[in-house]
Amino acid sequence: MSELPQGATIGILGGGQLGRMLSIAASRLGYRCHIYEPGAAPAGDVALTVTTAPYEDEAALRAFAASVDVITYEFENVPTSALDLLESLKPIRPNRRALAISQDRISEKSFLNDLGLQTAPWAAVNSEADLRAAADQLGLPAILKTTRLGYDGKGQVKLTATADIPAAWASMNNAACVLEGFVAFDREVSVIAARNLD
């Protein structure tokens, strides 16, 4: 599938604000959208169809795949078991490798750094001792983040002094983390790029 014909249906895993914006943009280009969301779906107000079911519901996933031409996702925390099933039924774009990289902050930062792109300074953290060493290396203030399942400020805590370290580490419940140093910047720019398969 190199080009999606107008009138095709795009399946979107996740029904939050990004799914809503994607549905609106797709409709302007002549596409329909089908949202798959376990909870409340703000995107459901603008999409053609919404399936409300858990990501573990195999029958619902199969019905969803049968009703769409291609599948994408609006956030990175889609369980791999759901993707394993869906990928066997319909193309997923971006592909699973892109999703796997974006699901783990260390994989994501390493991937970007290996391409020669700069990120905020960072260090992997798997213990309170690691956190202390990372804080010494990067300096404070810094942000401690879980490597997985954190978004929109969830799974994050700001450290401003070494006295914050024990409580910050305890709040992470021994989850794998990354400490990110602060970066002085003038502005933030968000860029979305699209390409075809070749």
Image (tube, grey):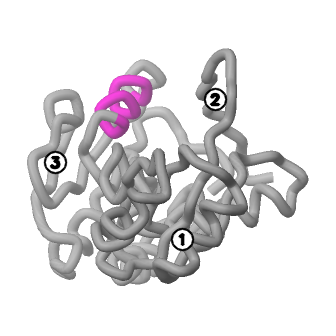
Q: Earlier in the sequence, mark 3 or mark 1?
A: 3
At horizontal 16% and vertical 48% (from top left) the residue drawn is 50
Q: Which mark is residue 153?
A: none
User: Mark 1 is on which residue type?
Assistant: Leu
Q: Position of residue 191 (x, y in %)?
A: 64, 29
Dot 2 crowding, Cα within 10 Å, few <14, some 14–19, many 20+: few
Residue where numbered disc 3 is placed: 50
Up the image or down, 163 lies above or below 49; here it is below
Q: Quadrant of the N terminus?
A: bottom right
| Foreground disc of the pair 1, 2 | 1
Q: Which mark is residue 191?
A: 2
In this view, which residue lies farthest toward the front? 163
Q: CA distance from mark 3 to mark 1?
A: 43 Å
Q: Quadrant of residue 171?
A: bottom left
Q: Helix, strand or loop at disc 2?
A: loop
**Pick the front one: 167 or 189:** 167
Q: Which mark is residue 131?
A: 1
| Foreground disc of the pair 3, 1 | 1
Question: What are the residue bounds of the magenta stretch?
Answer: 18-26
At horizontal 14% and vertical 30% (from top left) the residue drawn is 45
Q: Does the magenta portion include 112?
A: no
User: Mark 2 is on which residue type?
Assistant: Val
Q: Position of residue 105 (x, y in %)?
A: 56, 63
Q: CA distance from mark 2 to mark 3?
A: 28 Å
- Residue 188 visible in this rendered orientation of the protein: yes
Dot 3 crowding, Cα within 10 Å, few <14, some 14–19, many 20+: many
Q: Earlier in the sequence, mark 1 or mark 2?
A: 1
